[in-house]
């Protein structure tokens, strides 16, 4: 399973890249706004931090302007993936950009039928939002199970990119379902490293080691 970092905070991305656990990055207009920076500059900097796909989202709602924005964003760096919303204009844009060889991430997916349409439009990634479904009383992971099954049934090459991940249990569930990618805030990746028995065990090992008076180097 690949891990993408869901942030436009370059300091956080540099720190996470050093762990070797980050396979790509996703951004959205809200995350770009939070960075307080010009979009083209922050996307270019993120693309210099990772060789993996970096999703940059269009903000137009009509097909023609989406296409122009997508081509502009794609030209920023070779690892940009253009992100489009799951609307009719977004799917049309996905088809054209995908046919041109641009990887497209179709976002704001909340149903399995939407995911089926994105695959038919040639999307490289589909982003079903599990956290936002959970927030309104649905089970986001049921959607992931459906999409994984449908894509398997027809050997679609579109990767299931589980989005709106809020905590490590979402990652575990997505991994058990065989989702290709999870995008999450860096804090979730770090939370996955933690276990109280790891901390307790390490503390005991170091205490015993100190009693020996030795040092390895
Ligand atoms: C990623 O592509 C999505 O934009 C992101 O995961 C949304 O997460 P949120 O629901 O926590 O805003």
Image (cartoon, rainbow, N blue to C red):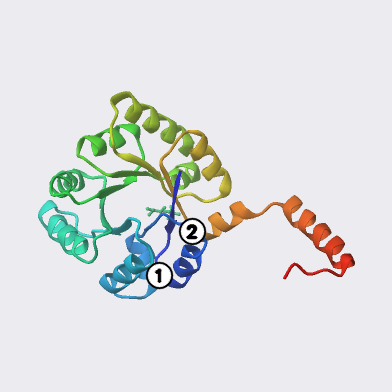
Quarter of the view holding residue 76: bottom left
Residue placed under numbered mark 1 in the picture? 34
Give the position of the C terminus as an image quadrant: bottom right
Residue 15: horizontal and vertical position, in percent? 50, 68
Q: Is residue 57 visible?
A: yes
Q: Quadrant of residue 95?
A: top left
Neighbour class for label 1 at 10 Å: few (<14), some, many (≥20)? few
- Any part of residue 138 in sight: no
Q: Residue at x 14, y 55 (%)?
A: 67
Distance, label 2 to label 1, CA atoms, is 25 Å
Name above or below for residue 54 compared with residue 106.
below
| Number of marks in picture | 2
Is residue 187 rendered to the left or right of residue 214?
left
Q: Residue 48: image x %, image y %?
A: 34, 68
| Closer to the camera in the image, 28 or 3 | 3
Instruction: Tell me the residue that label 2 is attached to.
Output: 20
**Residue displayed at 17% across by 64% down:** 72
Mark 1 falls on what kind of element?
Answer: helix
Please report whichever mark, 2 or 1, sits nearer to the chain's N-terminal start: 2
| Position of residue 16 in the picture relative to residue 55 (left or right) | right
The crowding category of the residue bearing disc 2, from other C-alpha atoms within 10 Å (few below 14, some 14 to 19, many at least 20), is: few
- Left or right: 88, with 189 as reference point: left
Q: Which mark is residue 153?
A: none
- Position in image of residue 140 (x %, y %): 46, 39
Mark closer to the observer (2, 1): 2
Could you tell me which secondary element the residue under label 2 belongs to?
A: loop
Q: Residue at x 19, y 43 (%)?
A: 91
Q: Residue furthest right?
A: 211
- Is the CB of the residue bearing disc 1 within 8 angstroms of ligand 1? no
Percent position (x, y) of residue 52? 35, 56
């Amino acid at each position: 399973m690949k891990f993408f970092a869901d942030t436009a905070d370059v300091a956080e991305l540099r720190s996470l890249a050093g762990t070797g656990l980050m396979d790509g990055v996703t951004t959205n207009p809200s995350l770009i706004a939070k960075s307080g920076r010009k979009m083209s500059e922050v996307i270019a900097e993120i693309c210099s931090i990772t060789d993996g796909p970096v999703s940059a989202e269009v903000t137009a709602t009509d097909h023609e302007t989406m296409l122009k924005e997508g081509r502009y964003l794609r030209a920023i760096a070779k690892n940009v993936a253009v992100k489009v919303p799951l609307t009719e204009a977004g799917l049309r844009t996905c088809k054209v950009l995908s046919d041109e060889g641009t990887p497209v991430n179709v976002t704001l997916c909340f149903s399995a039928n939407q995911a089926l349409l994105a695959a038919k439009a040639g999307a490289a990634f589909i982003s079903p939002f599990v956290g936002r479904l959970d927030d309104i009383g649905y089970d986001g992971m049921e959607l992931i199970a459906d999409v994984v099954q449908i894509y398997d049934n027809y050997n679609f090459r579109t990767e299931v990119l589980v989005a709106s991940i809020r905590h490590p249990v979402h990652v575990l569930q997505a991994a058990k379902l065989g989702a290709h990618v999870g995008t999450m805030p860096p804090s979730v990746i770090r939370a996955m490293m933690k276990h109280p028995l790891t901390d307790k065990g390490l503390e005991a090992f170091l205490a015993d080691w100190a009693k020996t008076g030795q040092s390895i180097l």
